[in-house]
Amino acid sequence: MTVNHQSILALGYTIIEDINIDLDYWIKQCYKYKNEVCIESKNRSSVGGYQSDSSIYKHPTFKSLTQFLNSALLKSNLTKDPTIKINNMWINISNYGHYNKIHTHQIFPQFFTEFSGILYLKVKENNGGLLSFKNPLDINMEYTHVPKNGQLVLFPSYLPHEVTVYLGKEDRISLSFNYNMYGTTTDHISNLKKNIK
Ligand SMILES: [Fe+2]
């Protein structure tokens, strides 16, 4: 596993490469989930394509991948806090002309999201679909990342970003996820309520 911290616009994101996962297997699982479970996100940034609901981290199929991604965050040294874990994850499948509007993954105070990530399962270089990070203080200042197959990109959840229009003819497939403090949101909120009493 190779960890490469990038500093951009006084912010930063991290690229993790050489990860040992079977991309073809996970691509098949994404299609299987899409075809069999068939739940789409109601709150989506994507324009066109398929974006699953964000509960797939709980699905038995994706459990081992979720554990792997939890350990990848700790290995990246972005945090030493083992309580920070994925508590939402969703599938993105896009094709020609699809894109994602500018958004962040920070839904504070409801969700306490710390870090977000994208695992690229199938992308084509030189076909658009680039990840464009924006400076939260001036969204005209941007840095564009060119995704590669098998790459894991981690970034602070407050960092605005968009995906440029994809111009490939084959499906472009990625998994997006958020790492939240204290395991699950519901656990944390119930702990907060206990403390308030
Ligand atoms: Fe996003």
Image (spheres, helix red, strand yellow):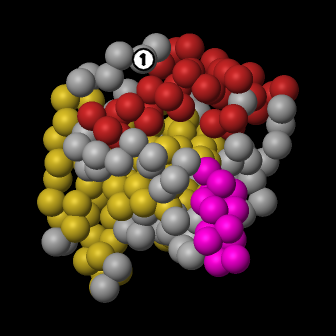
Query: Mostly what secondary structure, the magenta segment?
Result: helix
Left or right: 172 as drawn, with respect to 110: left
**Mark 1 Cα shell of 10 Å, populated few (<14), some (14-19), many (≥20):** few
Q: Position of residue 34 (x, y in %)?
A: 76, 32
Give, as a three-letter code, the residue at label 1: Ile
Query: Callout 1: helix, strand or loop?
Result: loop
Q: Position of residue 188 (x, y in %)?
A: 61, 60
Please tell me which residue lies in front, 191 or 142: 191
Q: Position of residue 124 (x, y in %)?
A: 41, 34
Q: Position of residue 70 (x, y in %)?
A: 44, 36
Residue at x 68% of width, y 48% of height: 54
Q: Is residue 117 visible?
A: yes
Quarter of the figure with the C terminus: bottom right
Please tell me which residue lies in front, 93 or 21: 21
Left or right: 138 as drawn, with respect to 21: left
Residue 172 higher or lower than 157, as above or below: above
The residue tagged 1 is 21
